[in-house]
Amino acid sequence: MAIIATRIDGRLVHGQVANLWTTKLQATRIMVVDDKVSQSQIEKSGLRMATPAGVRLSVLDVDTAADHILNHKYDSQRVFIVAKGPAPLLALINKGVGIDSINVGNMSQTDDTKHITKSINVLDSDVADFKELQSKGVKLTAQMVPGDESQDFMSLLKKGLGGEA
């Protein structure tokens, strides 16, 4: 399986992911990993409409995604994994999927989140997941679009939390 990139983006497939990242990475498949979205025909339909022509889309729950990856279903493809937050990616890794780096793009603000950058807001559970990902040796970077400079995400997280991370 050629997992060419893994990104956290609360919007999943949209302009930046569909046009900028998919093109830059020359991805042939976008794999959205989200237990709730995978059960919603309406959300899946919207994601299909946002996916560029010529690029395949899979919208899978964590268990199915791990099963497909570990059974080499996409070995001949260039797969770009996208999730709304760190939890599904941590779950994939815990199931044996090899993910060595994650680009943190956009995580939306809610009443319960802490502001890290202009586009990244985290819940306490996200912070715990990011720490566990880091402890597993996953490289965490922050980069909104391919033309931006990649930054060390854990340094941004620590600074955003006032040194807590």
Image: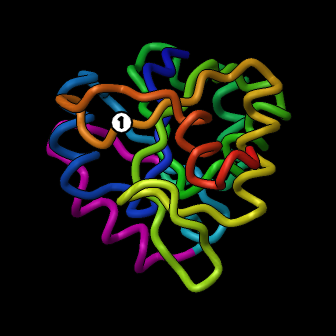
Image quadrant in which the N terminus is located:
top right
For image coordinates 58% across by 85% down, the residue present is: 111
Measured as percent of width and height from the top left, residue 126 is found at 70, 56
Q: Which residue is mark 1?
A: 143
Magenta residue check for 47: yes
Residue that lies at the very extreme toward the front in this rendered image: 162
Residue pictured at 63% horizontal, 18% vertical: 100
On the image, the x and y values in percent for residue 107 come to: 48, 60
Query: Can residue 105 be spotted in the picture?
Result: yes
Residue appearing at x 78%, y 43% in the figure:
91
Q: Which quadrant of the rendered structure holds the C terminus? A: top right
Q: Position of residue 133 (x, y in %)?
A: 75, 33
Query: Along the line of sight, which residue is nearer the eye, 62 or 126?
Result: 126
SS of the residue at dot 1?
A: loop
- Crowding at dot 1, Cα within 10 Å, few <14 / some 14-19 / many 20+, comes out as some
The relative height of residue 54 versus residue 35 in the rendered view (above or below) is above
Magenta-tinted stretch: 40-58
Q: Position of residue 74 (x, y in %)?
A: 51, 24
* Residue 156 forms part of the magenta stretch: no
Residue 71 visible in rendering: no
Q: Residue at x 44, y 19 (%)?
A: 4
In the figure, 164 relative to 100: above or below? below
76 relative position to 88: left or right: left
Residue 23 location, quadrant: top left
Relative to residue 91, is residue 88 drawn left or right? Answer: left
In the depicted view, which residue is nearer to us: 150 or 98? 150
Mark 1: amino acid: Gln
